[in-house]
Image (cartoon, rainbow, N blue to C red):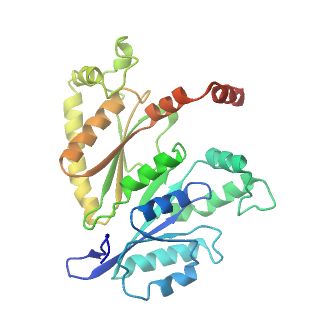
Amino acid sequence: MSEIESITDRGGLVRQRIVLVTGPSGAGRSTAIHTMEDLGFEAIDNLPLSLLPRLLEDPPMGRDLVLGLDVRNRDFSVNALIETLDSLRDAPGLETELLYLDCRFDVLLRRFSETRRRHPLAPAEGPEQGVRRELDLLVPIRTRADILIDSSDLTPHDLRAEVGRLISSETGARLAVSVNSFSYKRGLPRGMDMVLDCRFLRNPYWDPSLRSLDGRCAAVRDYIAEDVRSGPFFDKVLDLARLLLPAYLDEGKAHFAIGFGCTGGQHRSVAIAEKMAQALADEGWQVSTRHRELERRQVALQATPSEMAANVDKGR
């Protein structure tokens, strides 16, 4: 057996773990596959679906397996992929997961424009047509995903880190919990399983001494904690998470995403998300945190003057 052992169920059956990776072109599928290869997975990209049964005829490999699938595969079709996925999930000797790399239309279009590549679904047309066709084509597959990562606002480095957090190479239980904060002004993050609204809590924004700080600061956390509703709200959400997480783990779910939102995504949602992530981690769950608006602010602060001018020009 190699550094990453195959999974063994309670009946002693050695199970081969397989992760199928797909998503629209330009969403970061190759980056995700390379990351998993670095984690010890055996990686095969662009494998024709018709060859997959032949690949699995042999006994389980000593390593977990990741397979990259996209519309460029010569026999790719949505129905064929769904049928293959259902067949793999029903197979007694396999543990199969679908990782879907998602991305917003405008970001995909920008990425294709920057690389000047032709879209595989519109080789003789503009990238707009190809991106729209592919996003529409993949809707039924996206709904089947066990793990969904939206790469729209992630750098390649951030995407590698997110994949590394969500895809554990250890045997046994593997429910990865991500706790997120966000601003309702910018809409709900994609892929959330549970979303809580924190806008009813006392808002540190109206205290001039706290306005420039964020929910990771002790002064902000203390300010929010003075709201008599804060403690009961947090306790009830934590109790709900304690009920749901073991149940989803028993169902074989690989990822559970919790989102906390407030007006600006800077104070209340960040403070509650940080507190929740710490509480779940203390109870033994594999937890990652992401503060969407704080990340955007950090990116804006790091932008060069020329990049900022270009963004201003685009907004005119």
Quadrant in the rendering for residue 310: top right
Which residue occupies the extreme top position in the image?
208
Position of 77 compared to 52: left or right? right
Residue 142 seen in the current view: yes
Position of 235 compared to 108: left or right? left
Residue 6 in percent (x, y) is at 31, 75
Quadrant in the rendering for residue 238: top left
Please report the residue visible at 66 percent of the width from the left and 76 percent of the height from the top. Answer: 74
| Rendered view: 124 above or below 262 | below
Residue 107 in percent (x, y) is at 62, 45
| Tag count | 0
Quadrant of the frame with the N terminus: bottom left
Position of 181 compared to 287: left or right? right
Please report the residue visible at 61 percent of the width from the left and 55 percent of the height from the top. Answer: 26
Position of 68 compared to 15: left or right? right
Quadrant of the frame with the C terminus: top right
Please report the residue visible at 30 percent of the width from the left and 73 percent of the height from the top. Answer: 5
Which residue occupies the extreme right position in the image?
124
Residue 85 in percent (x, y) is at 47, 74
Residue 298 in percent (x, y) is at 48, 30
